[in-house]
Image (cartoon, helix red, strand yellow):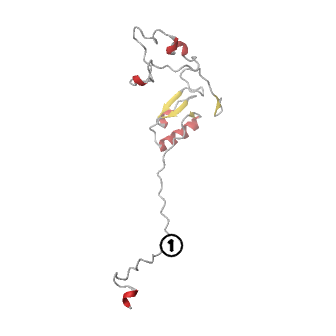
């Protein structure tokens, strides 16, 4: 796989390491996060196969790939343009709390230094502009029963004759 002209590294996959009883409706309090089992009769601790895999050192990545982004470079979290000084051959990730102006400044400086920026564009919600309502071209036609505003209710054509 190639990302922006750089050959991407594919890391080895491993199974999901779930806690026993995670996902059971009767035990909703059990969270997904891994915890090592300590019970004397626990099937997961005894490494019974149907209980699923447990984390072990054998699932680790090779030393050349460890702590690297899939593009093959180590990641550095940056929150200001001054932190880019002295960086070489790293992938830059801009911190989430950085605003639009500072983000643009960091991206420009990183491109000048030849650094890869992983999250260049952040989607900002632009304030919606309200469109002025279109004026109605024609005034509503008067109904036959309605009287013009200038006449009093008791004055009608029939009463004048």
Which residue is nearer to you in this view: 124 or 139? 139
Q: Is residue 55 visible?
A: no
On-image quarter of the N terminus: top right
Mark 1, residue position: 138
- Residue name at image x 42 percent, y 25 percent: 25
On-image quarter of the C terminus: bottom left
Q: Quadrant of residue 30?
A: top left
- Residue name at image x 46 percent, y 8 percent: 46
Q: Is residue 142 left or right of residue 11?
A: left
Identify whether 130 is placed above or below 116: below
Q: Residue furthest bottom?
A: 161
Identify whether 80 is placed above or below 127: above
Q: Is residue 156 visible?
A: yes
Q: How many marks?
A: 1
Secondary structure of the residue carrying numbered label 1: loop
Q: Quadrant of residue 68?
A: top right
């Amino acid at each position: 796989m190639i990302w922006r002209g750089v050959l991407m590294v594919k890391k080895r996959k491993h199974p999901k390491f779930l806690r026993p009883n995670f996902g059971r409706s009767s035990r909703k309090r059990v969270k997904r996060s891994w915890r090592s089992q300590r019970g004397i009769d626990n099937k997961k601790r005894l490494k019974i196969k149907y209980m699923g895999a447990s984390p072990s050192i054998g699932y680790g990545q090779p030393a050349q790939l460890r702590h690297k982004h899939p593009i093959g470079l180590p990641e550095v979290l940056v929150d200001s343009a001054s932190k880019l000084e002295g960086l070489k051959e790293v992938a830059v990730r801009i911190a989430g709390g950085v605003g639009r102006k500072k983000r643009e400044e960091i991206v420009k400086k990183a491109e000048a230094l030849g650094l890869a920026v992983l999250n260049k564009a952040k989607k900002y919600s632009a304030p919606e502009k309200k469109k002025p309502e279109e004026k109605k071209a024609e005034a509503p036609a008067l109904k036959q029963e309605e009287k013009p505003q200038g006449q009093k209710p008791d004055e009608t054509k029939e009463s004048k004759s």
